Image: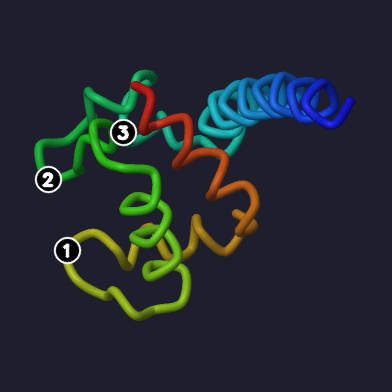
Amino acid sequence: MKVKAIAVMALLSLGVAGNAVADGAALFTAKACMSCHGADGKSPIMPMYPKVTGQSSDYTYNQMMDIKSGARANGQSMAMKGIMAGVSEADARAIADWLATQ
């Protein structure tokens, strides 16, 4: 019985992870990330803007949180600081998770 319960929970968690990735894609659009980084996160509108795909989720999330807190204040991060003010930690995690799959 315990094995069956564990199997059911594992399958349910896969659905949650899939939803988080889908939410990240929607948030990437809703938070206007594509305005600078491109719709796919791989084609920024200006050469100085980074491609935001192809990194681990943790790396991207940590970069976003450092920009939000002001710990990272180089390059274009000052422009991002204002944008990140409207992005919650949960939203940043969902966006980072989605970007890691792209």
**Compared with residue 49, is residue 24 higher up or lower down, i.e. above or below?**
above
Depth check: give the residue in front, 26 or 17: 17
Q: Provide residue 13's location: percent of width, then percent of height.
A: 70, 29
| Secondary element type, mark 3 | helix
Q: Residue at x 51, y 38 (%)?
A: 95
Residue 53 falls in image quadrant: top left
Sequence-wise, the earlier of marks 1 and 3 is 3
Residue 42 is left or right of residue 33, and the answer is: left
Q: How far apart in space, not on screen, are marks 1 and 3 (Cα)?
A: 15 Å
**Compared with residue 73, is residue 39 higher up or lower down, i.e. above or below?**
above
Q: Which mark is residue 37?
A: 3
Query: Which image quarter is the N terminus in?
Result: top right
Residue 83 is left or right of residue 50, and the answer is: right
Q: Amino acid at mark 3?
A: His
Depth check: give the residue in front, 77 or 20: 20
Q: Which mark is residue 75?
A: 1
Q: What residue sits right under mark 2 in the picture?
A: 48
Would you say the residues marked 1 and 3 are in contact, meaning their CB atoms lie under 8 Å apart? no
Would you say the residues marked 3 and 2 are in contact, meaning their CB atoms lie under 8 Å apart? no
Sequence-wise, the earlier of marks 3 and 2 is 3
Residue 42 falls in image quadrant: top left
Q: How far apart in space, not on screen, are marks 3 and 2 (Cα)?
A: 10 Å
Q: Provide residue 43's location: percent of width, then percent of height.
A: 22, 23
Residue ranking furthest to the right: 1
Residue 41 is left or right of residue 68, and the answer is: left
Q: Residue at x 29, y 74 (%)?
A: 72
Would you say the residues marked 2 and 1 are in contact, meaning their CB atoms lie under 8 Å apart? yes
Q: Residue at x 39, y 79 (%)?
A: 70
